[in-house]
Amino acid sequence: MATFNFELVSPERVLFSGDVDAVVLPATEGDMTVLAGHSPVMTTLKTGFLVITSNPGNGRRILVRGGFADVNQNGLTVLAERALPAEELTQEILDHEILQAEMAYDATNDPAAKHAAESAVAQLREAKAALNF
Amino acid sequence: MPSLKDLRNRIASVKATQKITKAMQMVAAAKLRRAQSAAEAARPYAERMSTVLGNLASGITVGPETPRLLAGTGSDRVHLLIVCTAERGLCGAFNSSIARLARDHANRLLAEGKTVKIICVGKKGYDILRRQFSQHIIDLVDLRSVRQIGFEQADGIAQKVLALFEAGEFDVATLFYSRFRSVIAQIPTAQQIIPAQIESGGASSEAVYEYEPEEGEILATLLPRNLTVQIFRALLENAASEQGARMSAMDNATRNAGEMIKKQTQTYNRSRQAMITKELIEIISGAEAL
């Protein structure tokens, strides 16, 4: 299977850099899978799991919260505002994230921001359920 | 002529000072390593961010639709200076060189008849600038309780700046910080952050992008984030520079203290010897007189 270059960068560090088969992105307008040779796209991300597949049947999940994905001929670059690999996730971290998202929901009156915060809470709850906490 | 006791006390106090400066140097060296790796780890994000922004911005034409963070407000009457310095002193010329750069900039703007507003990040810069610009300083961001600078702190500052910008409080924002070149070289830097300075994208700019959601919408979320990233980078560079400056300042101080101890010890030994000789002469001449 053709591979492409993928980089996942958070403000603090580079989380992933290398060749992969496929990446599933939690884009704002719906999840999308990026494969090799994808046409150039730029999209914003919502809260959710980003799944990296580097060989069939073997995926890595990373929880991202907001950010951008840039697909061009050189590969895929994801600039995540916050990124937490599933291995490093604990119940406390998730609870903290949920609390923060709920606070963001309460703090704003802007309908768009409220909607974003609401879906972030939902996504985080889902993530929590998926990880069996 | 100081007495022997005075000299002894003086040597002891210089020795104590030397111990402190030596310890500070070692602490700064350890902190520097951490701060430097944090600054280096943050660089890729900032670089990718400006590439993405460059790609995006080169594709659109500046019009009335363009976000004001990119196009500016159309005037440059009110300037905001964000001055990032350290919370602690004893780091050589680190704080004063940033403050001097900001002061020169502010004076030049004032001479041109512009309005200047200042946000100080870090207490030391505030202390220096307060003397001359106390009526211009609108805010002080205190990071003293923060151990390791995270994205949240930068975001907090960026939100403040954005709120001011939305309220039409200023037209141009400039960020002052010290770029970390090496342990002995930190370069005070002024960087304009609003309107955003875009390096035009290179070869990839002709690529036909699909945007999801709309181009303008992406740009509208990307620009505030870019501001945060720039501030974050400035804070990290600053933290590394501060430790570097402190390390070399304390190294100098330790060396100076060593020299001083050497000199004082010499004087001490000389005057001790002189005293002994004097007493001997007195005894001998006394014996001869008998």
Image (cartoon, coloured by chain):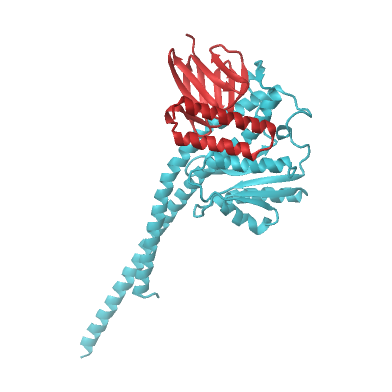
Chain colours: A red, B cyan
Q: Is residue B189 visible?
A: no
Q: Specify the farthest residue to the bottom.
A: B290
Vertical relation: B193 (above or below) B122:
above
Q: Quadrant of residue B199?
A: top right
Vertical relation: B20 (above or below) B26:
below
Residue at left offset 41%, top offset 55%: B21
Q: Nearer the viewer, residue B112 or B62?
A: B62
Q: Specify the farthest residue to the top.
A: A1
Where residue A96 sits: x, y (%)? Answer: 50, 37
Q: Quadrant of residue B223?
A: top right
- Give the position of the N terminus of chain B as an image quadrant: bottom left
Total label count?
Answer: 0
Q: Nearer the viewer, residue B174 or B143?
A: B143
Where residue B113 sits: x, y (%)? Answer: 78, 49
- Give the position of the C terminus of chain B as an image quadrant: bottom left
Residue at left offset 51%, top offset 42%: B149
Q: Nearer the viewer, residue B236 or B213?
A: B213
Q: Name the side, left or right, on which B254 lies relative to A122.
A: left
Q: Nearer the viewer, residue B96 or B194?
A: B194
Q: Is residue A72 visible?
A: yes
Where residue B121 sits: x, y (%)? Answer: 59, 48
Where residue A108 sits: x, y (%)? Answer: 66, 38
Q: Name the side, left or right, on which B119 lies relative to B243.
A: right
